Image: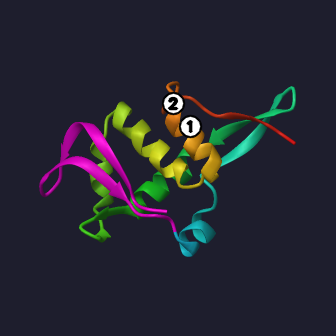
């Protein structure tokens, strides 16, 4: 798995202008300390729905932000607008999606950062 780069719709300012943000892959300690960024809840008719834990997603975004291979400044995330915040949320959640689901969602024309996934339960 590689780092995820989010191209911003509206640049933000830190010690320089940012037009994109990079997030490193979560590691063992990250997952053990923060847990999964979502849970699956029953949605009826043998389907379940992904329910994002936005507080955990925010912690991952702050922890995984990198700049030039080193930890980035998490305070710059506070400048993100709604559209870019949704892009970051989806990038973080995408680290935790099974490979098949990630491939399917990235090729779907309906892929929207505000859309939650539904999947049949076994």
Left or right of 41? Residue 35 is left
Q: Is residue 57 magenta?
A: no
Q: How far apart are labels 1 and 2 at the CA level?
A: 6 Å
Left or right of 69? Residue 120 is right
Q: Is residue 79 above or below residue 82?
A: below
Q: Is residue 12 magenta?
A: yes
Name the residue carrying label 2.
111
**Residue occupying the far left of the picture:** 16
Find residue 25 and report its horizontal and vertical position in percent.
46, 64
Find residue 13 and report its horizontal and vertical position in percent.
16, 48
Magenta extent: 1-26
Mark 2 residue crowding within 10 angstroms, few (<14) / some (14–19) / many (20+): few
Name the residue carrying label 1.
105
Image quadrant where residue 88 sits: top left
Mark 1 residue crowding within 10 angstroms, few (<14) / some (14–19) / many (20+): some
Q: Is residue 89 above or below residue 112?
A: below
Q: Is residue 49 above or below residue 26?
A: above
User: CB under 8 Å between callouts 1 and 2?
Assistant: yes
Find residue 4 and report its horizontal and vertical position in percent.
40, 54
Q: Secondary structure at mark 1?
A: helix
Residue shown at 48% from the left, 58% from the top: 60
Q: Which image quadrant: the C terminus?
A: top right
Residue shown at 64% from the left, 34% from the top: 117
Residue shown at 53% from the left, 30% from the top: 108
Find residue 86 and report its horizontal and vertical position in percent.
43, 37
- Judged by its main secondary structure, the magenta piece is strand
**Residue occupying the far bottom of the picture:** 29
Dot 1 or dot 2: first in sequence order is 1
66 or 74: nearer the viewer: 66
Q: Secondary structure at mark 2?
A: loop
79 or 42: nearer the viewer: 42
Left or right of 50? Residue 10 is left
């Amino acid at each position: 798995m590689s780092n995820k780069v989010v191209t911003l719709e509206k640049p933000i300012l830190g010690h320089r202008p940012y037009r994109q943000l990079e997030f490193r892959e979560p590691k063992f300690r990250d997952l053990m300390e923060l847990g999964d960024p979502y849970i699956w809840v029953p949605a009826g008719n043998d389907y379940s729905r992904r329910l994002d834990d936005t507080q955990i997603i925010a912690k991952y975004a702050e922890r995984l932000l990198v700049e030039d291979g080193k930890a980035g400044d998490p305070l710059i995330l506070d400048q993100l607008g709604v559209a870019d915040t949704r892009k970051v949320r989806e990038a973080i959640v995408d680290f935790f999606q099974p490979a098949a689901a990630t491939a399917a969602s990235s090729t779907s024309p309906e892929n929207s950062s505000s859309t939650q996934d539904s999947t049949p339960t076994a």
